[in-house]
Image (cartoon, rainbow, N blue to C red):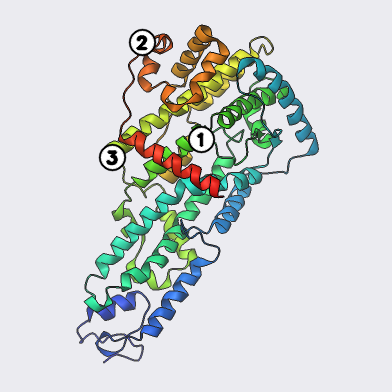
Amino acid sequence: MSDSTGAPRDDQPNDPLSEILRQLGIPTGPGGQMDLNQLMARLQQQMGAFSQQTSEGSGVNWERTRHAARQVAASLGPDPSTTSQQQREVADAERLANLWLDEACDFGELPRGAAALSRAEWIEQTMPAWEKMTEPIVSNIASAMGNMMGGQMGQMPAELGAFGAMMQPMLRQAAGAMYSMQLAQAIAKLSTQVVTGSETGFHLMEQARASILPTNVAAFSEGLEVADQDVLLYLLLRETARQRLFHQVGWLAPQMLAMVEHYAREITIDASALESAIDIDDMGEMTPEKMQQISEKLQGNLFEPTQTAEQVEILGRLETVLALVEGWVDEVVAQATARWMPNSSQLAEAVRRRRAAGGPAEEVLKSLVGLELRPRRVRDAANLWAALTADRGVGGRDAVWQHPDMMPTADDLDDPLGYVSGESTRPEADDLDAELAKLLEQEGRSGEES
């Protein structure tokens, strides 16, 4: 028997099945009996709260995430649209930058001219890259939620074993909704910090094009006592050099993204933090608003702090690649500005201080992917590239980028002269190299299909 509200009387034994279904918001009759049609209708109602415009792969509502990121960015400060005057200034600076870079590197001009972007435009243009980077995280959160709920459902009769499978789509969408707010906040914050499209060191833009954010450049320029035109030119030199590198070295950007994705797949979600944030009794009322509240509770507590041996190796390789990219940019821009920009050393030092304090990519990658990444050896990499320039010239230096097997390793950064002379010993390819090669091959096939 039950009282007028339908809740079990205190003097009745609490049937496990009835209790589990009650927690999920599904009413039952005597003995835990239920109407399967009613069950399906309830599940469809739950999934409908998250399913509109939701990616089948990640479970994240990317339209909502993009909109939320723009709203958060707008709340962090003014984000005026770029003016025609700013676009002309960028175009003029790019013409000069290209003239200088043609002498300092062996990679030609980009197919499209540079662009001045607002923060909102940067968010729009980088969102596809964030989607690829974070999809493994959502899968891990959904699995952790499924395991947590599986423990609650362990007392279900065998004939209801398929119930867990029926819940998986809802769990995936719930995980996506929960994570999307963290994603939106992190991307929004990053949009207020980056001065150029690829300052993170990753190729986040879909097009091979230099881009710069005038609002953020103005903040960077404060206190430097350098003319605004020189700051714009210097930052555009760095951005254009980096974009030339990504455009001409076809394997580089996909391999960096593959390493981040591989690292993300190995992440362990902190189950205790998840359980403390999600009350199983509230699963019947799991609205997008409640998922946002849960996401806020989990800020900074989502990932297990312990890294696997494989993650440590991936992290080391990724730090080395980032250091090589940024070190190459440092060397190329130093060569390009040596004769023409007397205050370039002052601007280079400002960039180094900014990087030492923690680059824009560092905080966002830790928040989104649990990846504590810092290219500690950029100066060592710049010295190696400078030694290569002195020994082989610009063409010989840049020819190293032709294939990943030719690239310097972390050990080579310790012995740049040995690398230049060809006397350094290089390790053979291992299982991780094979896995990354497979990911790159898959990336190439998907690009051809699209």
Q: Give the residue type that dot 2 points to.
A: Glu
Q: Give the residue type that dot 3 points to.
A: Thr
- Camera-nearest label, 1 or 3: 1
Residue in view at x 52 percent, y 61 percent: 54
Is 12 positioned to the left or the right of 356 in the image? left
Q: CA distance from mark 1 to mark 3?
A: 24 Å
Where in the figure is residue 19, as x and y percent of width and height? Answer: 28, 78
Query: What number is the disc on residue 253?
Result: 1
Circle 2 packing at 10 Å, graded few (<14), some (14-19), many (20+), is few
Q: Which residue is mark 2?
A: 423
- Camera-nearest label, 2 or 3: 2
Where in the figure is residue 322, as x and y percent of width and height? Answer: 46, 28
Q: Work out whether mark 2 precedes mark 3 in sequence or the reverse, and give the earlier one.
A: 3
Circle 3 packing at 10 Å, graded few (<14), some (14-19), many (20+), is few
Q: Quadrant of residue 340?
A: top right
Q: Which residue is mark 3?
A: 308
- Residue 157 visible in the shown view: no
- Camera-nearest label, 1 or 2: 2
